[in-house]
Image (tube, rainbow, N blue to C red):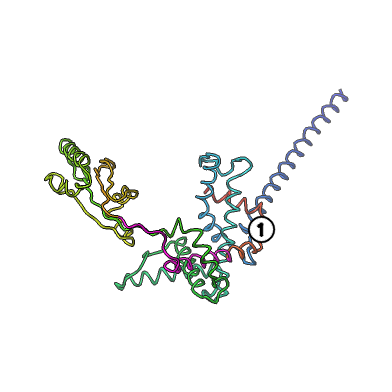
Amino acid sequence: MKKMHKKHHIKKTLHIEKKYIAAILAVLIAAGSLAFFIFRNRDGLDLTIGGMKIGEDEYLEAMQQEVYDTTQHFYVEYDAVVDSDFWEKDFGGEIPYKLLTERTIERLKQEKAVYGLAAEKGYIDSAGYDALLERFENENKIRADKIENGEPVYGLSEFTLELYMEYEKDSLQKKYCEDLDNEGMTLTDEEREEYYDKYKDALFVKDDDITLEFIRIRYELEELDEGIYQDLKTRMTDVYNKIDAEHTVKSLAEADAGLKPYLYEETILSGEYISKGKTLEDVIGYAAELKPGESTQVIDENGTLYLIQCTARTEYDYQPLEEVINNIDKELREQHYNAIIQERASGLKVDADMEKLYFFTEKNIKK
């Protein structure tokens, strides 16, 4: 009996010891998990760019501006859908919240480069985020005061922070480029000529002077019934079939009482394409390739009937370099400025606990 009692006592003791060990392990695991969680969340963020500490608000503002492009990347590359677990999925080795973190860092580097250069030039007092917020609030207050006093306000009546930053960065770029003593702002004739030759077919073709006679009937806008629509279309087809060396759209349509109210004649000079394009963009488009004497067929598109004839065209080649040199100078200086900013951004040292930063992004993007 004693042996059996002793054996039972040992078994019971072992059982108790196992319970204690399990409890101790559970406490240790919980403590370790808590310590890890606290470590990952300590200070929320651990990021310095170019010696400047990046706070949570600044990081989150930049992060939000990169969300769309990041999701678009995964949509285009992987046909991904932004669902509840999108940010943690692995797409061919790319994880969205990690790419978002890396894009955010690159955006912050660009911003630090822009504001750092502006501060060096004296355009702003400080390149810091707090100073940016102060300028942002002051600008909105100035606009609000003007509105209250009945003074004109150009552009937005109130900025969001994102729009203000775009507005301010454009202004800083303009200031830099207007000072020809700044690095990269002195241009050579060779640069100008190289740019002109490279882009002249895309940017510097001079539009032709063109004279058009045309019938345009917006039957959907006028809510013409089917019978009238078909009658006018038949009349236009009859005009088209009679066009020859002696008979133009104008001469034929003027003799038709039904079509005459819809007859127009326009001469569009080379420099008028933008201004007249507001009302004649469709007609100009259809007439783009017509030579003098040629016409379109009867076109029925977008609720409108067209019959267009070119009666005169003065063809031009390219705009001379001297006419577009100011535009070229502006473009080249902006390119040089952007290259300077990119070089400065690339040279900024990033100090970061990337695992902590990834965790911070992942946590906040899911809110």
Residue 131: x percent and y percent? 52, 70
Q: Is residue 235 left or right of residue 97?
A: left
Task: Please identify the residue farthest to the front as the structure is shown.
Answer: 245
Residue closer to the observer: 149 or 208: 208
- Residue drawn at x 55%, y 74% as measured from the top left: 182
* Position of 30 relative to 150 (above/below): above
Residue 298: x percent and y percent? 25, 41
Report the residue marked by disc 1: 352
Magenta segment, prevailing SS (helix, strand or loop) = helix
Is 137 covered by the magenta stretch? no
Residue closer to the observer: 128 or 177: 177
Which type of secondary structure does the marked residue at label 1 adopt?
A: strand
Please report the bounds of the magenta region as a residue range: 313-340
**Three-letter code, disc 1:** Ala
Residue closer to the observer: 358 or 66: 66
Task: Please identify the residue farthest to the left as the structure is shown.
Answer: 257
- Residue drawn at x 18%, y 48% as measured from the top left: 262
Residue 309: x percent and y percent? 26, 48
Q: Quadrant of residue 158?
A: bottom left
* Position of 144 relative to 355 (above/below): below
Residue closer to the observer: 232 or 146: 232
Task: Please identify the residue farthest to the right as the structure is shown.
Answer: 3
- Residue drawn at x 35%, y 68% as measured from the top left: 154
* Position of 293 relative to 229 (above/below): below
Q: Which part of the image, by quadrant, shows the N terminus?
A: top right
